Amino acid sequence: MTDHYKGSFFGRRVGKPLKDRQIALMRDLLPTISVDIEKDSPVDLQAIFPKPVKSICLEIGFGGSEHLIHRATTNPDVGFIGCEPFQSGMAKALSAIDSNKIDNIRLFYDDAGKLLDWLPESSLDLVYQLYPDPWPKKKHWKRRFVNQINLTRIARALKSGGEFRFASDIDTYVDWTLCHCRDHPSFEWSAQNAQDWRTPWEGWPGTRYEAKAIREGRVGRYLTFLRA
């Protein structure tokens, strides 16, 4: 069994040096809004938010945080958990949260597998994974986050009828995800026609990775799977 299937990620966590404000936010703000998996998971996940929320969504690997911030600011009565293991993405999210005084986001600065194992069963309404690292070389496909073990983790945390949303511009990863979700007993692809997977979800703000794909002539695919 590879490290990936134990839930670890690949790649460096630290990139370019942070600016002074980002360093301060990582030191001072992040601890106050982090999900602490060293504590017992709450009976009701809403307890991690400072005010009542009507539903809770998780974004796995939020990158530059454009989607996470947009969803949180346009849905203030929804609780969002953003998971990102890389320092630059976390610093960008913290800057936006601080500048916009957002209080319905909680962050996890580590591997998503650890968070999914900690979350209470049937505690999430929706899980996003948007334009993840495609690991395009066949020898690296085993590093992709979507696999049967991680889908089981997502299924355990999702409520019945909840959604797992996945977007990518890499055909092999789209096919990979369709096949893995088809083979998993807890998920059903919701598409009724081709337009369903060609069209982004309502309120879609786009991401920098999507914009790069469009510039390079690739087309995004938007898959929704329902938790049985």
Image: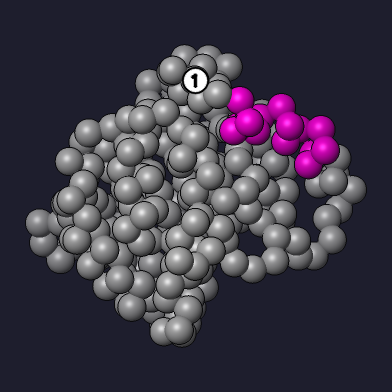
Q: Nearer the viewer, residue 71 or 158?
A: 158
SS of the residue under disc 1 = loop
Q: Residue at the spot x=32%, y=77% of the render?
A: 171
List x then y, in percent, for residue 81.
52, 37
Q: Residue at the spot x=51%, y=25% of the render?
A: 41
Q: Which quarter of the rendering shows the N terminus?
A: bottom left
Q: Read off the magenta span.
A: 25-39
On the question of residue 42 being in view, the answer is yes
Q: Residue at the spot x=38%, y=21% of the render?
A: 54
On the question of residue 68 being in view, the answer is no
Which residue is labeled 1 in the image? Answer: 42
Name which quarter of the figure residue 94 lies in: top right
- In the image, residue 155 above or below residue 170: above
Q: Nearer the viewer, residue 135 or 167?
A: 135
Q: Judge from the rendering whether residue 191 lies leftward or rightward of residue 13; answer left or right.
A: left
Task: Indicate whether residue 36 is drawn in magenta.
Answer: yes
Q: Judge from the rendering whether residue 34 lies leftward or rightward of residue 118; answer left or right.
A: right
- In the image, residue 98 above or below residue 198: above
Name which quarter of the figure residue 181 lies in: bottom left
Q: Residue furthest left?
A: 192
Q: Residue furthest right?
A: 20
- In the image, residue 218 above or below residue 17: below
List x then y, in percent, for residue 64.
60, 55
The residue type indicated by label 1 comes to: Pro
List x then y, in percent, for residue 40.
55, 24
List x then y, in percent, for residue 121.
36, 30
Number of residue marks: 1
Q: Residue furthest front?
A: 1
